[in-house]
Image (tube, helix red, strand yellow):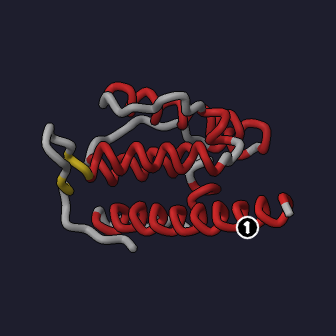
């Protein structure tokens, strides 16, 4: 009987995770469209592993211009990993400067596509950029619905 309950719980967790990823994908695409950028998120887990895409998203979200590592010499597969990692490091440094709580989120977990960590990161971004938490209750910064 225990395996049946654990499989139901796993299915619920997977369904909830898929729903959260879809909402975050819509939120990302909303901000990219708002800035009239041609890039779109198709798969949040894969897209955020690309540090350059994450920087483009942060630029669309904040309006700030961030540095990034690009160039033809990064076309080789070996260097693609390092380009992604360096760009994620730039993005994380920016988020820390903006005093966004990253908790124990690591760049390596994002690179590996860990869904729990990516969902935590996206939740922290939504909490910082969309929700104001005053002493009594909370309110939305924008009237945007993504569900």
Q: Quadrant of residue 46?
A: bottom right
Percent coordinates x, y for residue 67 in the rendering: 42, 35
Residue at position x 32%, y 28% in the image: 99
Near mark 1 (Cα within 10 A), the count class, few <14, some 14-19 or many ≥20, is few
Where does the C terminus fall, quadrant-wise?
bottom left
Q: Residue furthest front?
A: 1
Where does the N terminus fall, quadrant-wise?
bottom right
Residue at position x 78%, y 44% in the image: 77
- In the foreground, 65 or 40: 40
Residue at position x 48%, y 29% in the image: 103
Q: Residue furthest bottom?
A: 147
Regarding residue 43, the answer to whether it shows in the image is no
Percent coordinates x, y for residue 61 in the rendering: 32, 52
- Please tell me whether residue 26 is drawn above or below residue 123 in the rendered image: below
For residue 23, side relative to residue 140 (left or right): right
- In the foreground, 37 or 22: 22
Percent coordinates x, y for residue 108 in the rendering: 66, 33
Q: Quadrant of residue 11?
A: bottom right
For residue 42, side relative to residue 27 (left or right): right
Regarding residue 41, the answer to whether it shows in the image is yes
Counting the numbered discs, the total is: 1
- In the foreground, 142 or 17: 17
The residue where tag 1 is placed is: 8
- In the foreground, 105 or 11: 11
Residue at position x 36%, y 71% in the image: 146
Q: Secondary structure at mark 1?
A: helix
Percent coordinates x, y for residue 121 in the rendering: 49, 43
């Amino acid at each position: 009987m225990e395996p049946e309950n654990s499989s139901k719980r796993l299915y619920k967790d997977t369904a909830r995770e898929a729903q959260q990823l879809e909402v975050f994908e819509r939120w990302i695409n909303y901000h990219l469209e708002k800035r009239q950028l041609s890039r779109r998120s198709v798969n949040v887990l894969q897209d955020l592993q690309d540090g350059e895409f994450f920087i483009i998203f942060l630029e669309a979200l904040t309006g700030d211009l961030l540095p990034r590592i690009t160039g033809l010499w990064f076309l080789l597969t070996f260097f693609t990993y390092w380009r992604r990692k360096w760009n994620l490091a730039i993005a994380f440094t920016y988020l820390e400067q903006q005093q966004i709580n990253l908790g124990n989120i690591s760049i390596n977990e994002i690179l590996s596509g860990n869904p729990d960590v990516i969902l935590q990161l996206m939740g922290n971004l939504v909490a910082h950029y969309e929700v104001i938490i005053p002493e009594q209750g909370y309110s939305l910064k924008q009237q945007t619905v993504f569900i």
